Image (spheres, rainbow, N blue to C red):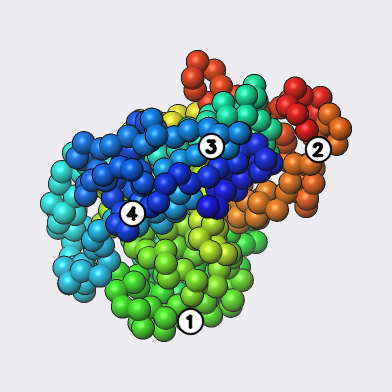
Amino acid sequence: MTNCLVDYYNVPERFVRMAQKGELPKGSGYFRLGSEICYGQCASLSSANTSSQPLADALPIATSEAGITCLPFDLAQIADNLRNERYVRNSICDSPLAAAYYIARPLLPVAIRKRIQRIRLSGWDKMTFPHWPVDLTVDNLFDQSMLMALRSNALDRIPFIWFWPDGASSCAIMTHDVETTEGREFCSRLMDIDDRFGIKASFQVVPERRYEVPRSYLCDIRDRGFEVNVQDLNHDGRLYRDREQFLRRAAKINEYGREWEARGFRAAVLYRRQEWYESLDFSYDMSVPNVAHLDPQHGGCCTVMPYFVGDMVELPVTAIQDYSLFHILNDYSIDVWKRQIDIIMKRHGLISFIVHPDYITTPRPGQTYESLLAYLAQLRGEKNIWMPLPGAVDRWWRQRAQMRLVSDGDHWRIEGSGKERARIAYASQENGRLVLNLKETSNVGDRSTVPS
């Protein structure tokens, strides 16, 4: 049983010892741990075929023995099933209808495309899982398990390495997917807008067919302190339809990544098969939504934190895309964004945006985007949000994964590359809920009541 709490919180393993209780059945299904939905195998319980059915609760079966939390399931398996979307039964990315739509898409006026998309997405607001507008299922499952660890060890608090550098409360990244020639031509103006608010972004560029990609265009983005990533191969919606075709395309995508010195990747339309990512030679990916009710491919990773898919770091898309906000919801305010930001900030997570240069060239959506930037700049100052380029988040998440909390008498210290930016934090319980508090003093030493 992999100790995923050690990976998530970066906590000394002896504080979060876990064991599997009972023999797991062969089939996977839905059940719950308290109020949180799980998908996978669970001993001693009958699982359901859908998340909307009445779900058996595994919490009463969980026990603590000699400081070990015993669960009737493998927590790492459940977390992986959710983050890797194994609970999703059908994928539109390999459907004939999707293929037909993307063949016809270049010939369809925007008004017709919007009508088709609204029909396809009708009933999205009736979907009960993942939870709209932000799903915290994985994060809440880990919190519930950390609570059990506190109780089983009879501790007031447990130390861990804080999620973000320099004690930042949360992290936010801005990304721009360039879809058309018009969008490419607007990128210089978009960088001016971003710079006015002191926010740098990554640009995901389609290598083939959509538009010309002059080297001067890529150099201009980098020279201005922004970031270039590869977006798909040709944006035809067929990247993940067939394994052999995917491998051929992945080889070409990897070549563009090396040629452009791009460390990040995003698939067009957020189509994805995370089990195929091993063929992509990138440091990080940004193709998985947190909750995908308004995307063509439903599902969602159910977490607001980065996570590893093999050797690649996944930076999930945790905020609604500008296209969905403007053209599906017909909403030109930032109210939905603000609601999502508030939920994610309370969980100290990653706030990740996709705003296309193609869709903000006119005054109304452009003004909405500038309102979002102004709000983010305000939060950066007032709430200590870290707002780096996506590549910096990838580098930090890798560094943090290699750091360790080491006891030194009655002190704790952080060891590993990047430790000077890392901070010690504590998990404790308050009124039956897990509370995460950042330690305000230096990370050099800690005279805590936690046994070392």
Marked residue nearer the N-terminal end (4 or 1): 4
Q: Front-most of 218 and 85?
A: 85
Looking at the image, is 50 positioned above or below residue 59?
below
Looking at the image, is 243 positioned above or below residue 16?
below
Residue topped by disc 1: 251
Instruction: Left or right? Give the position of 196 relative to 20.
Output: right
How packed mark 1 is, by other alpha carbons closer than 10 Å (few <14, some 14-19, many 20 or more), is: some
Residue topped by disc 2: 407
Marked residue nearer the N-terminal end (2 or 3): 3
Q: Position of residue 362 (x, y in %)?
A: 34, 48
Contact flag, marks 3 and 1 (Cβ < 8 Å): no
Instruction: Left or right? Give the position of 293 relative to 381.
Output: left
Give the amino acid type for the residue marked by disc 2 in the picture. Answer: Ser
User: Which dot marks residue 69?
Assistant: 3
Q: Position of residue 202 (x, y in %)?
A: 53, 56
Q: Front-most of 327 and 17?
A: 17
* Mark nearer the viewer, 2 or 1: 2
Q: Secondary structure at mark 3?
A: strand
Residue 191 shows up from this direction: no
